[in-house]
Image (cartoon, grey):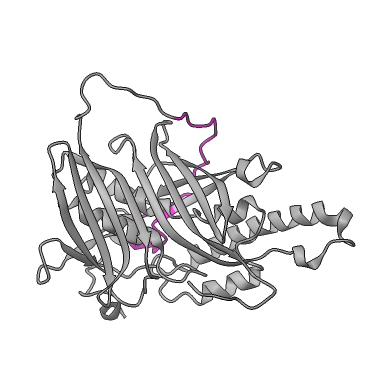
Amino acid sequence: MAKSVTLFEPPPLDPSKAPIENVLELTPVVDVGRDVFTNTRPLWHPPGARGIYGGAAIAQSLAAAMRTVPDDFAVHSMHCYFVLAGDSEIPIVYHVERVRDGRSFITRTVQARQHGRPIFTTTLSFSKANSGGRKRLEHASSMPSVALPEESEPGAKRAFQQSGGGPFESHRAGIVNRHLAPEDKKVRRFFRSRGKISDAGGHRAHLSALAYITDSYFIGTVSRVHDIPRFSSPAELEKLLKALKNPSDLDDEDIARALKELKEEETVELRRRLEGALSKATSQDPKEHKEVGMMVSLDHSIYFHNPWAFRADEWMFSEMESPWAGEGRGLVLQKFWSKDGILIATCTQEGVVRLKQDDSPRSKI
């Protein structure tokens, strides 16, 4: 299988690197060009998704672009478009274009291709360290007062080559303004990569890890603030998990954990909705029932604020909100803070969010 999903035979996992470093490893394709790269290892196809996990294309495009800029430049913005669903059963080839090299800013574009067609494209801007001068305008949103998650059971951050587990972990941190309108709710989570990111990887490995993580639970915020489960039933979720085409980032333990967490989340949401509907159950119109029919990311932007001021293998706090949804689309904003309360990134994502209709669908994407 490895030969069909990657251009080259994947090397053994590097025990000196964190799981996410192994997952995001790139291989140069020198026969094609000096700025062409491919995924070294198979990519994950999440349950229910049309293609590969979008965070992989985001993070590997960033990693490819960073290989073409000097070490004293760091990415400060990244604007991405998901063009076609990525197929986890064939390799991805990343083509980097050196658009501009300035004294303070560098611009790159990256196009991810499969079968010669673009499936993902991004434009990135890099700024030189300490190029803002001694006098600066500075401000940042403060991190809400929240307690860090309790440490997982012993061995939860064990080495990747021993566990085979997913490359990062997350913990729910609640929903703020749960009883207000959808646009006023805020969904909170903690994230961190498993293991310890290597010193050799440096701050760039932490940036790639953060980019990978930003796509997790993102567009799903639109349905969550409307109290609509992502999956209509635990049985549907279990069916999708079993149908994973290439679960290279998950082992049986991780799948069981993901299934348990999603079942718990949806059980709580369904119970709360049922309790609120008891008084009007007899008069409720069945047409009011809402169920997600399609959820697909369209574009994704990341603004990196403090690229040297965080570690992706330490807990990072995320707060997501959806200021708007309509016309079959939804918009989500997300902020990331480091464990020390430093605002490290602001992200936006818009996606297709369509409900199942009583009549037949009229069009396809």
Q: Which residues are magenta?
A: 141-168
Which residue extends farthest top?
135
Q: Position of residue 33 (x, y in %)?
A: 11, 66
Q: Position of residue 60 (x, y in %)?
A: 28, 58
Corner quadrant of residue 287 = bottom right
Please name whichever residue, 172 or 301, is drawn nearer the observer in this view of the structure: 301
Residue at the image position 49 percent from the left and 53 percent from the top: 218
The reply, left or right, for residue 53 in relation to residue 207 is right
Tell me if residue 358 can be seen: yes
The reply, left or right, for residue 296 in relation to residue 234 is left
Q: Position of residue 23 (x, y in %)?
A: 31, 61
Q: Is residue 220 above or below residue 310?
A: below
The reply, left or right, for residue 158 in relation to residue 150 is left
Provide the major secondary structure of the magenta segment. Answer: loop
Please name whichever residue, 341 or 194, is drawn nearer the observer in this view of the structure: 341
- Magenta stretch holds residue 155: yes
Q: Is residue 159 above or below residue 316?
A: below
The reply, left or right, for residue 320 in relation to residue 5 is right
Corner quadrant of residue 183 = top right
- Magenta stretch holds residue 327: no
Q: Position of residue 325 (x, y in %)?
A: 57, 53
Tell me if residue 157 can be seen: no
